[in-house]
Image: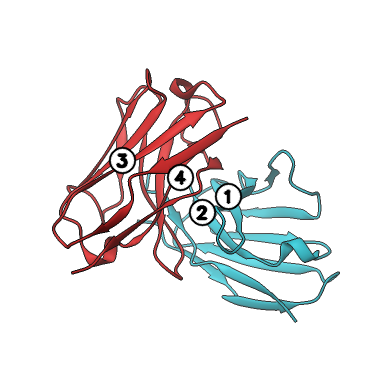
Chain colours: A cyan, B red
Amino acid sequence: DIQMTQSPSTLSASVGDRVTITCRASQSISSWLAWYQQRPGKAPKLLIYKASSLEIGVPSRFSGSGSGTEFTLTISSLQPDDFATYYCQQYDSSSPWTFGQGTKVEIK
Amino acid sequence: QVQLVESGGGLLKPGGSLRLSCAASGFTFSDYYMSWIRQAPGKGLEWISYISSSGSTTDYADSVKGRFTISRDNAKNSLYLQMNSLRAEDTAVYYCARSRVVASISPLDYWGQGTLVTVSS
């Protein structure tokens, strides 16, 4: 199975900061990568699909990039609603889907 | 609007069985692949299974293969997860979710609120 590794596990930041989260795949997944946001006690929310495509309704301060094995999620200017846990997920058709372990974005 | 509502969770002993249901509304259920994902308390997300729009194709994570069975009833707009031989490590909130693209395996754009399954002696 394809392993997904996120870094960092926890990130402390302030409102207005630019934040970057990295996700690495154990083998190439082309651009078959999604990012989700999960707030405490809530279901995950899809932010980005196909590595860099913004889901409808998601603010433009969120962006994704990368291909192959290395991917990033960037929040250009952190807002109070953005303090949450973020997960990457690979959906390459050759392998069972797997999620990264999550990155918690905390208030500094 | 799209709604997914899970039910059937509860407390049961190791070795037991449980059937989860997910009632879908607000979209043409029979057009979409559906998935089950779980989250153990305080842990990350784990994909468990998906099923094609017709129900003819399924796949499972190794951790549940042979014990869990996903199915759907398109006439009832419902998704199911039959869980057998339950273990303590199956304790989690179980979410159903919809693939975002019609008739395609794709990321999950709508999720239910989750149902808690607790396996404990």
User: Tags 1 and 2 in contact by the CB under 8 Å rule?
Assistant: yes
Q: Position of residue A106 (x, y in %)?
A: 68, 75
Q: Residue shown at 56%/53% (left/top)?
A: A44
Q: Earlier in the sequence, mark 1 or mark 4?
A: 1
Q: Position of residue A4 (x, y in %)?
A: 47, 62
Which kind of residue does numbered mark 3 sit on? Asp
* Marks 1 and 4 share the same chain: yes
Q: Position of residue B16 (x, y in %)?
A: 16, 54
Which kind of residue does numbered mark 1 sit on? Ala
- Residues packed near mark 3 inside 10 Å, few (<14), some (14 to 19) or many (20 plus): some
| Residue labelled with disc 3 | B59
Q: Residue shown at 33%/45% (left/top)?
A: B8
| Residue labelled with disc 1 | A34
| Residue labelled with disc 2 | A89
CA separation, marks 2 and 3? 16 Å
Q: Residue shown at 22%/49% (left/top)?
A: B65
Nearest the viewer among A60 and B91 is: B91
